[in-house]
Image (spheres, grey):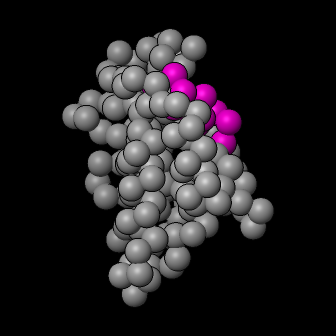
């Protein structure tokens, strides 16, 4: 279903083998969050979506785990607000990252935000993963 959705928007995507439910559950457990259902469905069908120039439009489960661990490392606290309230899942290609905000109950909202690495701002860009993908390709997401 999701591969067809992406292909309906553009042919510029590369897909990966599906992630397992256990892999997704491990990420959720590690960060004490519940990922948005739409993201889980995409990962279960294709473990990551890469756009032109190998841009990580939606990261693999392993990359989601590794990047979020990296940004929660203590050395970032000196320069940025904490990242515990974000789950990064994709990249812009210029250093900015796309994320879901995390509520106090550990639930990821479905809205997509972009974190600006230069000024540490966090800005809403889309109401869902599917709109994030669609609007990214249409050039509607301005960072």
- Whole-percent x and y of residue 92? 36, 48
Q: Nearer the viewer, residue 63 or 132?
A: 63
Q: Quadrant of the N terminus?
A: top right
Residue 135: x %, y % from top left = 50, 34
Q: Is residue 106 above or below residue 129?
A: below
- Give the quadrant of residue 96: bottom left
19 sits to left or right of 54 = right
Residue 138 to residue 55: above or below: above
Q: Residue at x 77, y 62 (%)?
A: 105
| Image-based side of 72 in relation to 37, left or right | left
Q: Residue at x 31, y 58 (%)?
A: 95
Image height of 126 relative to 108, above or below: above
State the residue at coordinates (60%, 28%): 41
| Extent of the magenta region | 36-46
How far from the left and from the top, in percent, is residue 98?
A: 47, 51
Q: Nearer the viewer, residue 132 or 142?
A: 132
Q: Is residue 124 visible?
A: no
Instruction: Answer whether residue 45 is magenta in the image.
Output: yes
Q: Relative to 58, is 106 on the left or the right?
A: right
Q: Main secondary structure of the magenta part?
A: helix
């Amino acid at each position: 279903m999701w591969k067809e959705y992406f292909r309906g928007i553009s042919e510029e995507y590369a897909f990966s083998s599906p992630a397992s439910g256990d892999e997704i559950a491990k990420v959720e457990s590690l960060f004490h969050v519940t990922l948005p259902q739409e993201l889980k469905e995409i990962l279960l069908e294709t473990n990551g979506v890469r756009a032109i120039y190998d841009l990580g439009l939606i990261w693999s489960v392993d990359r989601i785990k590794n990047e979020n661990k990296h940004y929660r490392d203590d050395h970032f606290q000196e320069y940025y607000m904490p990242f515990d309230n974000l789950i990064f899942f994709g990249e812009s290609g210029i250093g900015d990252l796309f994320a879901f905000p995390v509520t106090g109950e550990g639930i990821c909202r479905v809205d997509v935000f972009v974190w600006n690495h230069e000024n540490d701002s966090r800005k809403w860009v889309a109401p869902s993963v599917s709109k994030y993908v669609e609007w990214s390709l249409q050039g509607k997401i301005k960072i």
